[in-house]
Image (cartoon, coloured by chain):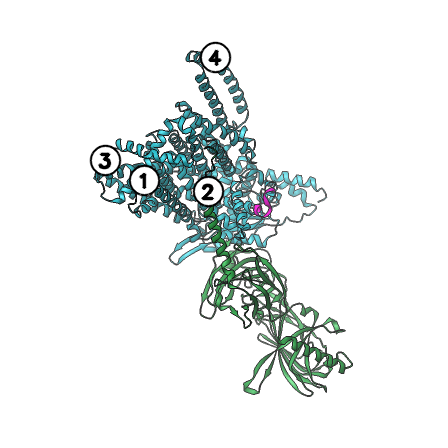
Chain colours: A green, B cyan
Amino acid sequence: MESPIRATRILGFIFFSLLFFVCRSAPSHNLLISNAERRIDLTSHIVKVYLTLKVENAGSTPTSEILLAFPPTQVDHLATVEALVTKGKRKKTTLVRLDVKPTELPDVPNGNKYFTIYLANPLSSGESTTLEVLYMFTHSLEPFPAEIGQSESQLVYYRDSALILSPYHIKQQTTFIKTPSTKVESFTRVEPTNRAGTEMKYGPYEDHPPYSFSPILIHFENNSPFPVVEELVREIEISHWGNLQVTEQYTLVHGGARHKGVFSRVDYQSRPTLSGASSLRQLLARLPPRVHSVYYRDEIGNISSSHLRMDSRKSELEIEPRYPLFGGWKATFVIGYGLPLQDFLFESSDDRRYLNFTFGCPLLETVVDKLTVKVVLPEGSKDPSAVVPFPVEQHLEAKYSYLDVVGRTVVVIEKKNLVPAHNSHFQVYYTFKPIFMLAEPLMLASAFFLFFVACVAYLHIDLSIRK
Amino acid sequence: MAAPETSTAAVPSLYTNNALRNAFGGVLSFFILLLIGVMAFSIRLFSVIKYESVIHEFDPYFNYRVTQFLAKNGIYEFWNWFDDRTWYPLGRVIGGTVYPGLTLTAGTIWWLLNSLNIPLSVETVCVFTAPIFSALASWATFLLTKEVKGTGAGLTAAALLAMVPSYISRSVAGSYDNEAVAIFALIFTFYLYIKTLNTGSLFYATLNSIAYFYMVCSWGGYTFIINLIPMHVLLCIVTGRFSSRLYIAYAPLVVLGTLLAALVPVVGFNAVMTSEHFASFLVFIILHVVAFVYYIKGILSPKMFKVAVTLVVSVGLAVCCAVIAVLIALVASSPTKGWSGRSLSLLDPTYASKYIPIIASVSEHQPPTWPSYFMDINVLAFLVPAGIVACFSPLSDSSSFVVLYIATSVYFSGVMVRLMLVFAPAACITSGIALSQSFDVFTRSIKFQLPGISSNTEVDAAETSSATAEAQNDAVKTEKSEETSKNRPSKKSKKKEKEEKPSTKAKAEKRLIALPLDSSVISLLLLILLGAFYVVHCVWAAAEAYSAPSIVLTSHSHDGLHVFDDFREAYAWLRHNTDVDDKVASWWDYGYQTTAMANRTVIVDNNTWNNTHIATVGTAMSSPEKAAWEIFHSLDVKYVLVVFGGLVGYPSDDINKFLWMVRIGGGVFPHIKEPDYLRDGQYRIDSQATPTMLNCLMYKLSYYRFVETDGKGFDRVRQTEIGKKYFKLTHFEEVFTTHHWMVRIYKLKPPKNRIRGKTKKSKSKTSSASSRAKRSGMGKKNPWH
């Protein structure tokens, strides 16, 4: 209910600002970044960037929009952008999440893409604020060499810029890059550049105009496996008899350097650290608590290598694929489990019901290229609507299961390029009358009744022609 | 026996009224039958509970794959299915070479469930088809035995069949094989035959030919029916039991049955062309001659009849001689005398081992050992003779059929282990008769001497005596053939039977032989003990011996359960990490599984229809690396899969099967000689092994880098250190080995680039004849290379 009001307000604000400033890209000149610190975490295959910006309004009018710029090569791999602002004084600081939306701007240099951060309170002239921005890239580590043998370790390239790409003037900036190990083959130097242990420091650089760019290339060892789920279909089936059945179909691939040549089991078993260091041996799925009837199988049957640990707060399912996955190897499997309905289904104030469930993939440290969430509502439910905290594609389907007549409504939600940060809750609202629960038992009962009546009738009718 | 016993125990003495008692008995036997069905179904679920709901073994995977195809593409596509993923590069016409009964059944069940919106997968339906059909089979046994010896015997036989280990071995959940439905079809066809014989109803005769059609659809074993029934008809004629009922029971079956059988593509014209079916036509002719003679006898005076006989016999003999001469000439012109290899090995048990090593190499085609009889039918082996004796008192048309059935099936089961399956129902029927009859005698004598001591035994006695009464009734019926032939099994006739009962019962009581009380009590207890022993054995066999799916192996060690899931690991690897059109070569045992689970093209599979092709693979496996590479390369093979049990002690691996590869390969390609692989007639892989053995591909692929596991290369199956420990592969490379080394997959190295000058040299150097031929052939095709 709030968002339309806010949208109109923002629209109004944009209109207002357009009226006032002759130049369209004028807001960018009003702001400047007095200090920027960027920390790039390259330890896993998901590149996490923590950006701390101190933004100052040097213009004369208050503004509440701050632009973030990304080069076009990076924006394709960008999975998530979050912005936080610190509130309160000193000890009582709390982080407040801000709205971030992709923005299209005309005539931008080099085809850059923008995200706009909307501040809760407009930044008035001369004021400054500190923003914490977190964004993640997937598929940004390019294995080089692209094919490795079993005993070789996996080396990857990471490409970025030593200077933060920004439409604003940056007074001072520093970039820290963390690599998983001390083994770094090479890296571009943009003085001043320091390297100590697993961390590299680029900067501090002073006074760079907008859109400064200085490409760097880091070639380092990353032996962590790159689990990539090419496609994940999660089907969440609501049964008002008290169960929530979740079925997840995975197509898993090791996204690292492709495996080349032989696979020798004797090497793999006798020297597990040296041989196949980057191979994917096991995965951990974090499931909700009170999970029951968990299964882990693929199209040819049960996979026996899995363990389930449960406590009151969470359940952990440790799964091993049938075979260790080397770079480029694929596997498909299905995880299914049941959950008690009362933990996830609630009634909203307007007499509707809603399902509150996590959105993303329960496997830890996994990139999902394409996720399809299907929420199967019970037969007879009406007016479904889904509320997801980020932009997704939605449509409705019908599914026929156990003796359905009219079919169950399925809310299908699709999203591409997900990281574990997307594991937030989403809601599906619908209306349902409990009387529909009795439809199928009654149908069965009447079918049997008719059958018995037919039997009785047959036994009492003499169909023979002879007298 | 357990089921009826426990149920009768719960019955209070309620038989004040005879009609009420009969109604009660009907309801009771209905519920007993229901329980027998439930038991037959549930005793086969051990495999699902202990392991998982998965298709078992080898052939079921093929059937499963066919069913999947059927469910996906529909029946017309199925009939026209040419499978290019097997027998590469020949392919296989699946629609015309498969017995479609099982797949059509499961496909229909799946379609029905799905049209009711019950979304069961094809796999689930396939897994549970066999248990469902064993429940049906036990009901069919009830019907058959009831026709022969009454309700009591029927229930006993049904209960015995529901848990006979021999049948369980082929019908546990997941064992999705032809036999699972075929045994039901077999028993049901026999039942309908007996029913027709007892009633003379054309309705049942038609049903009988439809049941026979279903049997033909399901299993090659239908030839047993089409030979056994003529034999019985002949027996009836010879023993002077010819009647119009016999004619109605047999003639429609031959005509309709043969027509219907010819509709099944895999049988087709075989239904009239092969020798397996000749007996039925011959008997068909004889039956007509006999019927004609009886007819003539009826209308002519005895004197005229004699004249006619001499006339007909002289003319008939001449015609017969001519016909037989033509037939013999026709049959003798074919090399196998018109018999298929498997049928011939039934008639001559040594045939297969002499001429067809492929048939002989299958373990289920071997003759059984005595322990396997005890394992598979257990105490029934002791009850069968008693049952046969019981069938002779009195001998009716139907009981003579049972005697004939058991006599022939005993012989067949003695030739092939697999045919124990046909023997098991016969054993159950006769044992059911034996048990029921002896219970009858003992309880009656107890009842006779101790009137009203315990209502419990009385009910029992009464029930079994009523069973004999019915049997008597049958006997009476057969005597008065004219009357019963009109007797349709409507409600009215049932009522009539009920009215007849008291009188026949009285008759039965009259000729009752009372045994001493104590001995009959003791024998009764012993019989119950025997039954209990049987039940315990069956449950054990179902739970332990026959429930393993054989694609997953488990072993119990001191640190708990160990699961060996290597086969599926390898198949899953092939499925996801090789190109979809890659060809995988392995010994034929794993062909069906590879196509079904890995979805890759194979060279040979369990359908063994082309001996030469299998021999080619066998030759490659027994050749040295280079020659093998050339053979595989010429077949466009990319991966070679071998099964190796040496690390974990899995005995049925490829090294143990290797001699069959040599034999089958040598049968077609004479340069492979079995003695080359044997040291003094002994098959060994240790340091005493022959160099041919140590250099053949199978040895190398199995033991490649095996020595590095423990430093010695100790083979746990052969219990010896391997002969050649350190060697390198020149033409193959290891691409995958499963966790317990049970499946090893090798890739053929790509052919080396040829240098222009060197081609001629290498051509002259090639050692094996076949490879030279291939090289030169290739040279002709591509002269510019």
Q: Amino acid at mark 4?
A: Leu
Relative image position of residue B732 (x, y in whole percent):
57, 49
Query: Dot 4 surroundings within 10 Å: few (below 14), some, or many (20 or more)?
Result: few
Residue on which the image places disc 2: A458
Q: Which residues are magenta?
A: B69-76
Residue on which the image places disc 4: B311
The chain letter under disc 2 is A
Dot in front, 1 or 4: 1
Q: Amino acid at mark 2?
A: Tyr
Sequence order check, earlier mark of 3 and 1: 1
Is residue A28 depicted above or below B292 in this figure? Answer: below
Dot in front, 3 or 1: 1
Q: Secondary structure at mark 2?
A: helix
The magenta stretch spans residue B79: no
Question: Are the residues flagged by discs 3 and 2 in contact, CB closer than 8 Å?
Answer: no
The magenta stretch spans residue B71: yes
- Do circles 3 and 1 both sit on a common chain? yes
Q: Quadrant of residue B435?
A: top left
For the residues labelled 1 and 4, the Cα–Cα distance comes to 58 Å
Sequence order check, earlier mark of 1 and 4: 1
Q: Amino acid at mark 3?
A: Leu
The chain letter under disc 3 is B
Query: Dot 2 surroundings within 10 Å: few (below 14), some, or many (20 or more)?
Result: few
